[in-house]
Amino acid sequence: QEVKRCGFKYFIVGAFNNQTRVEDLFLADLIDKGEDLRNAVSFSETWESIVDGVPLYEPVPVGLLKCKRFKINHVLFEIDLVNYKVDYEKFTMDRVCALVKRRIDWVRENLSSDSLIFFNLRDFSDTMTLQPQRMWKIVNFLSTLPKKEKIAGLAYEDVGKYEKDLLGGWTRAVRNE
């Protein structure tokens, strides 16, 4: 009710994983009460399983499966580009982009062709410092998708490790990509 009173059109309802968490119970309750969830957004991992340093295409992340179960059409994918568990020599940025495209297609086919899709660049600052070419590759890939396949936007996190002027410069550079 508070979300409605604030006038927000879109609202985040959860970050699903393989356990039953409060958002699972909360959404079941909202559905039982007939709540309109057309503008709800949920987090999902882009990949969950990593074997020998390579994220797997299958299984589909639990977050997406729960979005389908709860009829949540809008997704904010979490993605890391300097994850210590991933061997980026084997799982190249071309393969990262292929997996990202596969997730976008899955959302459009299984949730809604009109889904709003976002990507949260969870390790943005470290990627810009350590492997900026990876950031350019994923941002260029996402920004050049055909119009009907475009995502709604990008987000990033910073834990206060870097100066705000540096973050501002990086943000401008990414926006200009």
Image (tube, rainbow, N blue to C red):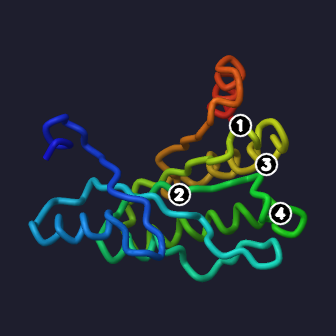
Q: Indicate the amino acid at tag 1.
A: Ser
Q: CA distance from mark 2 to mark 1?
A: 17 Å
The secondary structure type at the circle numbered 3 is: helix
**Disc 1, disc 3: CB below 8 Å?**
no
The secondary structure type at the circle numbered 4 is: loop
Residue 125 got which mark? 1
In the displayed structure, 119 sits above or below 169; it is below
Q: CA distance from mark 4 to mark 2?
A: 19 Å
Q: Quadrant of residue 163?
A: top right
Sort mark 3 into few (<14), some (14-19) or many (20+) by Cα contacts within 10 Å: some
Q: Residue at x 64, y 48 (%)?
A: 144
Kindly report which numbered mark, 1 or 3, lies closer to the viewer in this rendering. 1
**Disc 1, disc 4: CB below 8 Å?**
no
Residue 92 got which mark? 4
Pick out the residue farthest to the right. 89
Q: Position of residue 56 (x, y in %)?
A: 69, 77
- Left or right, 174 with respect to 54, comes to left
Q: Residue at x 76, y 79 (%)?
A: 51
Q: Position of residue 61 (x, y in %)?
A: 53, 74
Q: Indicate the amino acid at tag 2.
A: Phe
In the displayed structure, 10 sits above or below 36; it is above
**Disc 2, disc 1: CB below 8 Å?**
no
